Image (tube, coloured by chain):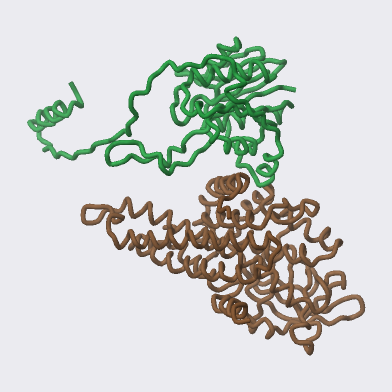
Chain colours: A brown, B green
Amino acid sequence: MDFRLNEEQELIRSNMREFALKYVEPIAAEIDENARYPKEVIEKLADGGWMGMPFPTEYGGQGTDYLTYAIAVEELSRSCAATGFTMSVHTSLASMPINNYGNEEQKKKYLTPLAKGEHIGAFALTEPGAGTDVGAATTTALLDGDEYILNGTKTFCSNGPVADTFVTFAWTDKSAGPKGLSSFIIPKGTPGLTVGNHFMKMGIRASQTSEVVFKNCRVPKANLLGAEGSGMKIAMNCLDHGRIGIAAQAAGILQAALDESVSYSKQRIQFGKPISKNQAVQWWLVDMATDLNACRFMTYHAGWTKDQGQPFTKEASMAKLFCSEAVMKHTIKAVQIHGGYGYMKGVKVERLMRDAKITEIYEGSSEAQRMTIAGSILR
Amino acid sequence: MINIVSCFKWVIDEAYVRATSSGQIDLESVDYKISDYDRNAIEEAVIIKEKYGGDVTAVTVGSPEASKSIKNALSRGPDRAYFINDTSFADLEPSQTAAILADVIGAQIKYDLIICGEGSSDLYARQIGPRLAHKLGIPCICFVQKLEIKDNQIIAERRVEAGIEIITVPMPALVTVLSDINSPRVPGLKDTLAASKKPVVNIGKQDLSGNYDPKLETRETRAASLKRSCVKFGSEAQDVSGFVQALLKAGAIR
C-alpha cells in the first residue's frame, strides 16, 4: 500500500495552487458578492487544459486519471468553491456521460469542444418535483419520425445559464419504470429550449444555476445518449463520478477553513495571549485537521478505486457524505474562531461556511448517500 | 536559433520558515520552490525562445532531493533539463555552485545566452551570475530589467542607482535578471503533463573532475528576532532629553 501521490500529481497540485492563488483567490470574494460567473478564469482554465482532465487526448482531453482530477478540483475549491464546482459539473456531470456512453460521432461533436473547454457543459436532471426521487420526474421525450420531442421543466441546473451543451433526462416510456428514462444531448439554441435566469443562492454564488424548460423541443435521434431506456443508469453513473468531485470540493473548502483558522487564531490576542493558546481553540483545530486528513484519504481512495476499474459507487458515496458533513461542521467552527469578524462579509470563513452547506445537498443529499450506502451494506 | 541556458535553484519557501522559542530556525515542515528571481530567468528564456526562435536548457545543482524541481522547471517551458546532483551538494556556497555550473555548461551545453536570477530567495548572495560568466570567460550584465536580441547582439537595460543603463554585448553572454523583467506564467495542466516527457540529463559528482572545496565555514545559524518595547514620553521640551537618554540606553543611537 502506497499512500504517496506521484511526482506528477504533486506538481499538478502545486501548479493548480499557483493558478488559483494568482487568478482565483483575488476575485473570489467579488464574484461571490456579485454572483458573477468568472468567465475570464474559466477561459484560462480551458487554455491550461484543466477543463477536460480525465478524457482521452483524441477527444481534446488530457488523459489524466480521476484521482489527479480530484486533486485539481480540491486545490481550485480551496480558493473558490464556486469555480471548483463549475469545473466539476462541467467535467463529471456533463462531459463524463458523453465520454462513457456517447458514440464516436457524439464524442467528436460534443465531447471534444467540452474537453477543450471551448464549450461549457450543464447537467439537467432535477425537476421541481423530483430531487432525490429521480423517478418522480415528468419530462417526456416522444419519438416523432427521426426526432424526439421533449417537454418538461428542469430546475437547479448547474452551469445552465452559461452552458453550450446540456445533458438531460426524459421519459421515453413512462410505463417501463426506471428502464423508461433516456438521456439526451441538447445543444444551446435548440428551438424549444429555454434557459431561465441565474438563481440567487446562499453559497457558491458565482456558480450559475437556472431553470431549463423544454417546450416542444425537437432533437434528432442522433442526440439520444446511450440506448433508449438507459437514462437512469447514465444518471447514476454521472453522479457516482460527480460525488468524488464534490468530496474533493469539500476537502478544498475544509483546507481553506483550516488555513484561515490557524492563521487567525495565532494573531488574535485576547486576555494577553493568542487565542490559539486556548485548549478549546486547539481542539477545534485538531478536529478540523484530523477530519481533513480523513476527507483526503476517502476522496483519493474513491478516485483510485475508479481508476482501478473497480466499482466505486459506495466509495464515492461515503467520501461525499463524510467530506460534506465534515466541512459543514468545521466551517461553523471556523466562523466561531473568528468571532465577530467571522460573521462579516469579505472575511473568507463567512463565505466558506455558506459554500460548505451545498455540499450536503447537491449531487445526492447526505440522506441519499446514506440510502445508497445502506443498499450496498445490507445487500 | 538561440541556445539559451537558464540556471535555477531549488530553495526553501521562506513562508514556511519558523523560529523556535530558543531562537533556532525550524525547518521541520518547510516546502520548497524554485527561487523567485530564477522563475523570472526561466520565463525570460522562454519568452526569448518564443520571440526569436531557439531552445532552452534549464540547469540546477543540488541534492538528489531537489529532483522535484526538475519537472516543476520543465512545466514552465524549457525544452530539457540538466540535473547536477549529489548528497554533498545540499548547501553549497555560491563559489562551489558557480564552479560546478561552469564545468558542466562549458563542457556539455551549447549556449549563446545564459540567464540567471539576480539572487536566490534564500541566500541572495548574487554571486552565481558574475562568477559563472567569469569562469566561462564571457561578458556578464547584472540588474537587467529588459532584454532584446538584435543582429546576434544582446541589448540589455540595466537598472542602476543613477537611472537606466543600456548595454550591448555580442553573444555568448550572461545576464542576471530582476523580477520586473516579466511576470512568470502559471503552468497549465498541458505544460505540466508535457514536462514529464522532456529529456533530463542527470550528472553526478563522479562525472565531475573539478575541485569544489568550500571557502566559507558556517559556525552557526540562528533565527532573526525582533524585540519590541513600548515606552511613553511626554510632549514637553524637557521630555526630549529623557527620550534621547532612552535611545542611548537601548543602543539605538550613540
Residue A75: x and y in percent read 55, 53
Residue B18: tell me if it is visible.
Answer: yes
Residue B196 at x, y percent in the picture = 68, 40
* Residue lying at 49% horizontally and 25% vertically, measured from the top left: B119
**Of residues A166 and A60, which is closer to you in this image?**
A60
* In the depicted structure, whether residue B72 falls above or below residue A93: above
The C terminus of chain B sits in image quarter: top left
* Depth check, front residue: A66 or A276: A66
Q: Position of residue A135 (x, y in %)?
A: 69, 84
Q: Of all residues shown, which one is farthest toward the top?
A: B137
Q: Quadrant of residue A260?
A: bottom left
**Viewed as shown, does residue B17 lie left or right of A9?**
left
Q: Residue at x 70, y 79 (%)?
A: A153
Instruction: Tell me: B182 left or right of B242.
Output: right
What x and y, as percent, mark residue B241?
Answer: 10, 28
Residue farthest right in this picture: A145
Q: Is residue A35 visible?
A: no
Vertical arrangement, residue A216 with respect to residue B110, above or below: below
Label total for image: 0
Question: A321 or A308, which lies in front?
Answer: A308
Q: Residue furthest bottom?
A: A175
Query: Which quadrant is the N terminus of chain B positioned in?
Result: top right
Left or right position of A99 against A343? right
Residue at 67% of width from left, 32% of height from top? B200
Task: Tell me which corner region of the image, top left, top right, bottom left or bottom right, holds residue B201.
Answer: top right
A17 or B66, nearer to the observer:
B66
